[in-house]
Amino acid sequence: MLKRTHTCGDLRAADAGQEVVLAGWAYRRRDHGTLIFLDLRDRYGVTQVVITPDTLAAHEAAQRVRSEFVLAVRGAVRRRPAGMENPSLLTGEVEVVASELVVENPAKPLPFEIRDDLEANPSETAGRTSEFARLKYRYLDLRRPRLQRNIILRHRAVKLMRDYLDAHSFLEIETPILTKSTPEGARDYLVPSRVHPGKFYALPQSPQQFKQLLMVAGFDRYFQIARCFRDEDLRADRQPEFTQLDVEMSFVGQEDVIELVSGLCRELTMQLTEAEPPSLPFPRLTYAEAMARYGSDKPDIRFGLELQDLGDLLADTGVGFLKAALAAGNVVKAVAAPGLAGLSGQKLREQVKAYEEVVKIYGAKGLAWLDYPAEGGPKSPIAKFFSAAELAAIAERCQAGPGDVVFMVADTARVATAALGELRLRLGRDLNLIAPGQFAYLWVVDFPLVDWNEEEGRWDAMHHPFTSPKAEDMDRMTSDPGSVRANAYDIVLNGVELGGGSIRIHQREVQERMFQLLGHSPEAAALKFGHMLDAFEFGTPPHGGIALGIDRFIMLLAGETSIREVIPFPKNQQAVEPMTGTPDVVDKAQLDLLQLMSTAKKDAV
RNA sequence: GGGCCCGUGGUGUAGUCGGCUAACAUACUGGCCUGUCAAGCCAGAGAUCGCGGGUUCGAGACCCGUCGGGCCCGCCA
């Protein structure tokens, strides 16, 4: 093996005259018959190698080189002839004139091209390979400059997190992966115990209880780059295993956590993106405000189009379906779409139909609309039922002017809010209201403590059962639990929930009241959470923390839209990892050892 | 559990109203070529159109089923 002296990203004009050895992958080959150019690639960059017929052996070898051969090249660095420089390469001022070329390993034709088209490649062919093929040959996919950049970015981001927290006196502490299943939250991934047949470990959904117990232990400021596991259905931004930056602090309140994490987010944005540094403090909304104004607990505040409530304006309306909705106790909410009234009648009807599909996904039965044409009469079929005063009042409330359209949903507050919140996001994209390159952080605070679970007929913890209620709301925990606010907060970036946390309960009595509210009998609570309750009797400091979704954070920093683009070996939406073929059946002997038997009808062992 | 969309040479796509001997780019093979950098030019090979059934004189296209994939709803303390 020829040992490399430099990487493919090292050489500059000042290195001209040196003899070097480079090693890497053949990225592109340009064969002029006599003169052959090879672009040699490694993770540091690309360097052009020139092979002339003067070096016969190297020339013959270079003729046989194909894409992705692994090569080692010895040669002299020289400045490229005037006018032949390539400004798009960092090494573009120089080239290496090969004296020796070794094929370390050839490569068969690849299942897809490595070259990616993220920048300045108008080709339709590269970089859009089906995701299944990419995952099946992930080691090839990961050679692509785009994914290499993402993985390198991920390393830098995690290093910045460690450095930042270390500088703030935090300790990185590991917690168990094999732990105990708890009744709250998502479905657990279970691991059978061989030593204790019939018993199971659970993989942690988060290190929540352990980090709190580390506070009880006096570690004061803890963090961990923690792998978490949740057996729920997947999305573009959800994997069955994902990574959190888990943080917990003692003797702090909400403001301390918010300040710490805001600083971290600002630092990462400044160090890792070209974006304008976000200014501190980050804007803040209460949960109630976020829902009312944006129809979401994770608002994208990069654009306006806030939701409006029209209930008071339509109290005496003659419009039948709205009158009926309000009489039934439902709400009428609206959002404006600037400029949409300028569309032709047919275009507008098609657009409305598409938007109707959006709101229907979220349970709305229909989408009403009013247009305010700059000239001519309204195209809306229902405009004629509204009084002139109503039309004017709606326009004013929604800040809609000539040329705009107002969309309305009359439904339960939950449905109307969610549906229009999604429509708002769609309008923001369709109308190009989102300027690229922004990092719009937002804190959402004052979440409700609990949420009514219609199916189960009980209260669920909105965040988790260790979240403390606001002191001033505590007396309503039994009389009106739904109105109790929690010391809980989420950080949102560009409409994506980056993370959430809370100030925890640190008193046994309060924790017992919380379990009671959630429907756990004292016996059940003792069985599942006895260690927590016990700990609270041995000197537990006031404490709180947060967990940030690292995959999502990196995704946004990298400008990607799926966390799979920033995870080296992700699973697909079926929770399958196509490269290794995970999950898979196991030998009967393995099951026997665990005293397990599958009842699956298909593919059963 | 449910909704929408997609499966055509290795890869990415086109294929309109059912008439195809399935087109284009790239990769691949061979040839030409001393300054390219998405190298270029010439030639060639490569596809039973995911699978099964149906409608039809005729199906890549239409219908039913099935498998695989993507996005979403539910779910995700």
Image (cartoon, coloured by chain):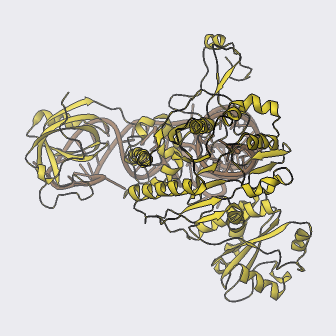
Residue A167 image position (x, y, % from top left): 41, 48
Where is residue A61, by image quadrant? top left
Quadrant, the C terminus of chain A: top right
Please name whichever residue, A529 or B62, is drawn nearer the observer in this view of the structure. Answer: A529
Colour for chain A in the figure: yellow
- Is residue B38 toward the left or the right of residue A393 in the image? left
Q: Residue at x 83, y 62 (%)?
A: A412
Residue A389 image position (x, y, % from top left): 81, 88
- Is residue A395 toward the left or the right of residue A248 in the image? right
Colour for chain B in the figure: brown
Residue A454 seen anywhere in this rendered image of the structure:
yes
Residue A279 image position (x, y, % from top left): 47, 66
Q: Residue at x 77, y 53 (%)?
A: A474
Where is residue A50, by image quadrant? top left
Q: Residue at x 18, y 48 (%)?
A: A11
In the image, is residue A204 above or below residue A387?
above
